[in-house]
Amino acid sequence: MTELAIETNLLNKIYRSKNGNSQKHALVDFSIQIKKGQIFGLLGPNGAGKSTFINILANLVVKSSGTAKINGFDIEKQKRKARSAIGIVPQELNLDPFFKPVEVLETQAGLYGVPKKDRDSMGLLGRLGLSDQAYSYSRTLSGGMRRRLLIAKALTHQPSVLVLDEPTAGVDIELRHQLWDFVRELNQQGTTILLTTHYLEEAQELCDQIGIINKGKLVANAPTKELLKSLDRKEILIKADIKNPESEIKINGINSIKANQDGYLQIIYRPSKINFLDILQQLESQKVSIIDIISKETDLEDIFLEFVRGQKNRD
């Protein structure tokens, strides 16, 4: 029995123009392994290939080459089993305005062949805080309610893998945190989560593994904690009493130094090139008395920009 929820090998997707004169390589030898029970975050700028990847998993887009499996089921050779194993929550709020939430779930369950005795439409709506809206028309629901209804819809056939494409886009902070709690609850119950998001804080908060895609290529893939440690860049803020304010402070081996609006010296450096004590010693040699030091922790935004800019430079 496979331990992988999602596995792709050298997956490619090429979009060609109607006249055949131009083409766009949306996925380039995209190979990834997502273990069962993970919350995996897939990050990338607009047009990086995230939606193409999800649409291939959902059998909405035909791959050009390579293989993709869901719970060990090949999406082409074992299409029905692969589809049953995955639930997709799209970014677009695509609901029939004249359907009521309970009807949306019952219809979806019917499409997947879920017997009526095994359906729990009202239970799902309750878990997502939509019990009171169960018999309201979808068009009367707020954006946040529609988002939650789409999640319930994707769960009607009890998939073991759930794909969330920008699940908290356009929702307020309170609802965002409620959805985070629900995602954690699902994961604790054994559901594997594939999350795409523009909110880097969201990925850092939820995901135990993160992949970064850019121009169709997987440019990074590691446990979140490892990824955060991998960036060779550090920022510190130093509040100082400068004995000779007219003299220019110089520190050899750092990237940059400048004073910010709060009167702190902002110093950016690479730990592989110079260590923190060397910086302090150079400041003291210039008669700079240190009053306060703030060390800024590396976050996912720093990592994301480093990899995306790094690929631009290589290209």
Image (spheres, helix red, strand yellow):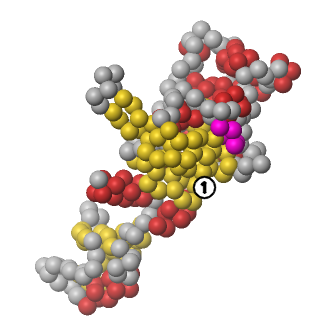
Q: Seen in the image, is 293 located left or right of residue 61?
A: left
Q: Seen in the image, is 5 located left or right of residue 268?
A: right
| Residue 50: percent from left, percent from top | 47, 39
| Residue 232: percent from left, percent from top | 40, 70
| Residue 211: percent from left, percent from top | 51, 52
Q: Seen in the image, is 14 located left or right of residue 245?
A: right
SS state under label 1: loop
Foreground residue, 246 or 222? Answer: 222
Question: Which residue is depicted at the point 25% across and 70% down?
Answer: 256
Question: Which residue is depicted at the point 36% across and 53% down?
Answer: 308
Residue 118: quadrant of the picture: top right
Question: Which residue is depicted at the point 77% across and 48% down?
Answer: 1
The residue wearing badge 1 is 208
| Residue 106: percent from left, percent from top | 73, 17
As for residue 23 lying within the magenta part, the answer is no
Magenta stretch, residue numbers: 70-74
Using the rendered image of the protein, determine whether residue 5 is visible from the camera's viewpoint. yes
Q: Seen in the image, is 32 located left or right of residue 21?
A: right
As for residue 72 lying within the magenta part, the answer is yes
* Three-letter amino acid code of the residue under disc 1: Asp
Label 1 neighbour load within 10 Å: few <14, some 14-19, many 20+: some
Tell me if residue 99 comes above or below residue 224 in the rendering: above
Magenta span main SS: strand
Question: Which residue is depicted at the point 68% across and 32% down?
Answer: 78
Foreground residue, 139 or 43? Answer: 43
Residue 77: quadrant of the picture: top right
